[in-house]
């Protein structure tokens, strides 16, 4: 059985799947990264992905344009981020509660909205047509390379975009004044405001960006990954993104690596469930189990670091 | 003097906080261009409030501010910065993970191609100003990795780069080592030569004598006077600073000290800023006496109390109660030895704010057998106990179930002492027990402290309130720079004398200081 598993993993199509599965997690993780850098916890990524997945698909269906669908999803995501910001920063609700509200809206509200707009229940079924799905592209030259070409070429445009965004996020955070302000606000808001940086504005920018990232992730899910929208589609990816952000120490590149780990766990799950004699329910746990183990290892590392300080935690 | 010479004039500044505390009462304060002006006073004298007003962090209730002879209103620090006033806070306003250069240009980052930070320009700007003002920093180092002394230079540079002509330094040497202080003074003098004006907040007399041109002394929210540094002696400064306006008297019987309860031996501790906070402290507290620790805050008192209650670990030395060491012990064990603790920060360490009065007063004894039956509480017993304590300590409240955080400061403190004083302690550590509370609660707490000591408890009283330590204590220990500067057990002390020891003008011989210990 193990041999069978190894055979299926040590193939180009497995690594291709890893990249494909990682992409939506990576989008959401980058959303978690930018929010966290500004000192905002965006726990509403899951709900944001659900909602943007639906709107992305519907807009694409109405306009018959996948590009407008993606842009619509990103816009809706940014607006949801701003809404959370408005609740948390202006109305002073707890940001966690605002995030939970978005998640519940994502779980229940989307089914209602789908029904209202289309009369369908739970999934978009036969609305799917090829021209509203995100196209794949094969990269010239690279697609000629054996194995590597099979892994890297032929992905959806958004898959490449996800990995490009890792670099762009790094540039934004470390090479632009906006990024400098985001990092300063997240680490010492008093210091930032004492030199005239508007803490509020910076936090709004960060959470809107965070929502926009989740919007890309949502669009990817409904307009490529699942080829249509259904209510159980996001399946915890927004939460896994928070774990990936933490494990990646909040840095774009580190978070990409932990996203890949989770993507790999998910890909493994599909491979293992194909094997005979393995409980599919048990196998379904793999990505989440990896998340828990990853977070535990991360926390152990953090605690060790804290022990170096001479003052004992008393509270 | 020509008014144009005065860069900053503050006239009749009064600040009354919403809770009714008057931090400044018609204070006049002015600074000449190109001088280093000391602002000196005890904790709570109103120095910080006055400077917060000047830097736009607080709005004055009354009074006006003139900058270069023109009236100015500061609604925020940005207004103050635009008028050329910069402030270096005691707690640095820096972002640790950013580099020095990034911190300096934060909020005004130079750009290239419109979108990106011109980091090279930031470094150049930093270097240029570092060179110009002789404040050497490493532009590429992360602030988290640099020394406290360099962080301070970064803060000063930050203000200068933003065009500050007047620099407010809030106790800048409190966090520096001796060498760093020497360096800072050189830099400040060089800035004075370049025409900058510096307001230097401190309560270290030797530093003020060495560095400053003029001194404004504050006490009790008022300005006591302005002096030329050269024409006033340290003794006079000390007298103006710590003089008591009202003499408090507490009635108490003669102490009859018994056995040694707390023995502190040669404690050494280096605090989080690398400063030697305790440097060989040895003393005893005997049963039946109140030993007071006086001193300007920040001379090691905080660290001593934390060590005694197991909140910090000393580098060296021991503290024992009844022969058993307290060092690094869990708080429950320290309490089991009969130690009670009235913490300075009552909201964090004294009470659970959202808990009820009852829950707070029983929090050290709820596990006693008399309050439990199997897995359940004997609620009647708990109610009886808390009602009795509320009555005994005159806690003004609606019911025992009332949330503690809703009470007034004085009543919150009564809840703390009700718990701490009623557990038959053999040693009470009282850290600023009456700070910021009303007269009634203050009197009750002081009286109970005396009663408990006369009934045989050992009391260690740490207080920045000179009246309180001088009147309550049977013997007094003065802390200065982590050491005992003097100890007195004859009751013949006065504020002039205390001031001289507290501010480091005088120090007893080692032999005299040795009398603090009876071991």
Image (tube, coloured by chain):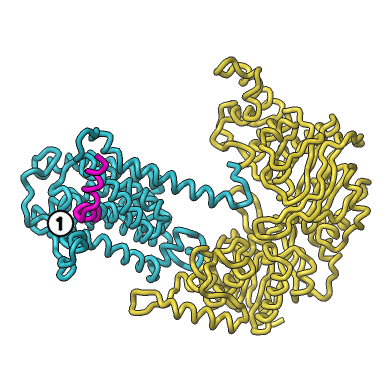
Chain colours: A cyan, B yellow
Q: Which residues are magenta?
A: A1-19
Quadrant of the image containing the N terminus of chain B: bottom right
Indicate whether A99 appears above or below A75: above
> Which residue appears at 30% of the width and 41% of the height?
A286
x then y, percent, for residue A265: 29, 46
Left or right of residue B353, residue B478 in this image: right
Is label 1 in a helix, a strand or a loop? helix
Left or right of residue A69, residue B311 in this image: right
Circle 1 residue: A69
State which quadrant residue A94 falls in: top left
Left or right of residue B391, residue B78 in this image: left
> Which residue appears at 66% of the width and 17% of the height?
B370
x then y, percent, for residue B512: 93, 53
Front residue (pair B227, B459)? B459
Crowding at label 1, few (<14), some or many (≥20) Cα neighbours within 10 Å? many
The answer to whether one can see residue B202 in this image is yes
The main secondary structure of the magenta stretch is helix
Indicate whether A16 appears above or below A47: below
Is residue B52 magenta-colored?
A: no
State which quadrant residue A2 falls in: top left
The answer to whether one can see residue B26 in this image is no
Left or right of residue A249, residue B514 in this image: right
Indicate whether B400 appears above or below A257: above
Front residue (pair A12, B127)? A12
x then y, percent, for residue B457: 82, 33
x then y, percent, for residue A163: 27, 62
> Which residue appears at 42% of the width and 55% of the height?
A249
């Amino acid at each position: 059985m193990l041999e069978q598993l190894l055979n299926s993993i040590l193939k180009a199509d497995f690594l291709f799947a890893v990249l494909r599965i990682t992409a939506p997690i990576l989008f959401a993780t980058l959303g978690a990264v930018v929010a966290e850098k500004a000192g905002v916890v965006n726990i509403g990524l899951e709900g944001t992905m659900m909602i943007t997945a639906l709107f992305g698909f519907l807009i694409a269906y109405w306009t018959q344009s996948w590009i407008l669908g993606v842009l619509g999803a990103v816009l809706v995501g940014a607006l949801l981020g701003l809404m959370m910001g408005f609740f948390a920063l202006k109305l002073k609700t707890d940001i966690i509660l605002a995030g939970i509200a978005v998640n519940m809206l994502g779980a229940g509200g989307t089914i209602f909205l789908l029904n209202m707009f289309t009369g369908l229940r739970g999934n978009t079924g036969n609305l799917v047509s090829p021209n509203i799905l995100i196209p794949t592209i094969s990269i010239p030259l690279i697609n000629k390379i054996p194995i590597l070409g099979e892994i890297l070429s032929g992905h959806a445009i958004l898959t490449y975009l996800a990995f490009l965004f890792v670099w762009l996020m790094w540039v934004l955070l470390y090479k632009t004044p906006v990024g400098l302000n985001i990092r300063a606000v997240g680490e010492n808001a008093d210091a930032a405001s004492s030199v005239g940086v508007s803490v509020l504005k910076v936090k709004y920018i960060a959470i809107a960006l965070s929502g926009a990232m989740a919007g890309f992730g949502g669009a990817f899910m409904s307009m490529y990954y699942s080829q249509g929208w259904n209510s159980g589609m996001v399946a915890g990816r927004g939460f896994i993104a928070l774990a990936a952000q933490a494990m990646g120490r909040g840095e774009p590149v580190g978070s990409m690596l932990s996203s890949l780990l989770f993507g790999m766990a998910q890909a493994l799950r599909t491979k293992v469930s194909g094997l005979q004699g393995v409980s599919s329910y048990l196998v379904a746990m793999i990505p989440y189990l990896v998340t828990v183990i990853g977070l535990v290892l991360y926390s152990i590392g953090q605690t060790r670091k804290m022990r170096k300080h001479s003052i004992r935690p008393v509270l | 003097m020509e008014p144009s010479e005065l860069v900053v004039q503050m006239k009749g500044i009064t600040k009354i906080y919403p809770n009714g505390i008057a931090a400044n009462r018609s204070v006049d304060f002015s600074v000449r261009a190109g001088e280093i002006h000391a602002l000196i006073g005890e904790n709570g004298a109103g120095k910080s409030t006055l400077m917060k007003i000047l830097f736009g962090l607080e709005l004055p209730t009354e009074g006006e501010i003139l900058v270069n002879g023109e009236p100015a209103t500061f609604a925020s620090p940005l207004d103050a910065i635009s008028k050329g006033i910069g402030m270096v806070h005691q707690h640095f306003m820096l972002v640790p993970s950013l580099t020095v250069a990034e911190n300096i240009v934060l909020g005004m980052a130079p750009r290239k191609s419109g979108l990106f930070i011109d980091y090279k320009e930031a470094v150049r700007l930093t270097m240029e100003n570092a060179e110009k003002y002789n404040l050497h920093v490493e532009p590429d180092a992360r602030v988290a990795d640099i020394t406290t002394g360099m962080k301070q230079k970064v803060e000063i540079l930050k203000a200068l780069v933003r065009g500050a002509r007047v620099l407010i330094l809030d106790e800048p040497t409190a966090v520096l080592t001796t060498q760093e202080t020497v360096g800072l003074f050189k830099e400040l003098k060089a800035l004075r030569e370049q025409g900058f004006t510096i307001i230097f907040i401190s309560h270290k007399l030797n530093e003020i004598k060495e560095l400053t041109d003029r001194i404004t002394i504050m006490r009790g929210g008022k300005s006591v006077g302005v002096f030329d540094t050269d024409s006033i002696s340290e003794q006079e400064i000390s007298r103006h600073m710590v003089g008591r306006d009202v003499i408090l008297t507490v009635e108490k019987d003669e102490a009859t000290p018994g056995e040694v309860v707390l023995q502190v031996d040669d404690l050494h501790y280096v605090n989080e800023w690398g400063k030697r906070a305790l440097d060989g402290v040895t003393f005893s507290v005997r049963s039946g006496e109140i030993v007071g620790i006086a001193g300007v805050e920040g001379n090691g008192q905080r660290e001593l109390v934390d060590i005694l209650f197991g909140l910090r670990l000393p580098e060296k030395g021991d503290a024992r109660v009844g022969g058993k060491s307290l060092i690094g012990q869990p708080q429950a064990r320290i309490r089991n030895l009969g130690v009670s603790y009235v913490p300075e920060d009552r909201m964090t360490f004294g009470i659970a704010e959202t808990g009820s009065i009852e829950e707070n007063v029983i929090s050290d004894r709820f596990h006693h057998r008399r309050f439990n039956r199997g897995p359940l509480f004997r609620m009647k017993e708990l109610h009886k106990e808390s009602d009795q304590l509320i009555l005994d300590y005159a806690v003004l409240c609606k019911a025992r179930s009332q949330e503690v955080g809703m009470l007034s400061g004085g009543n919150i403190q009564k809840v703390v002492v009700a718990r701490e004083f009623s557990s038959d302690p053999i040693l009470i550590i009282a850290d600023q027990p009456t700070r910021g509370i009303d007269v009634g609660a203050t009197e009750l707490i002081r009286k109970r402290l005396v009663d408990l000591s006369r009934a045989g408890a050992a009391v260690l009283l740490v207080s920045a309130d000179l009246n309180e330590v001088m009147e309550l204590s049977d013997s007094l220990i003065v802390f200065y720079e982590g050491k005992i500067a003097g100890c007195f057990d004859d009751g013949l002390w006065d504020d002039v004398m205390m001031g001289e020891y507290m501010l480091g003008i005088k120090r007893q011989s080692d032999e005299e200081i040795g009398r603090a210990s009876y071991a």
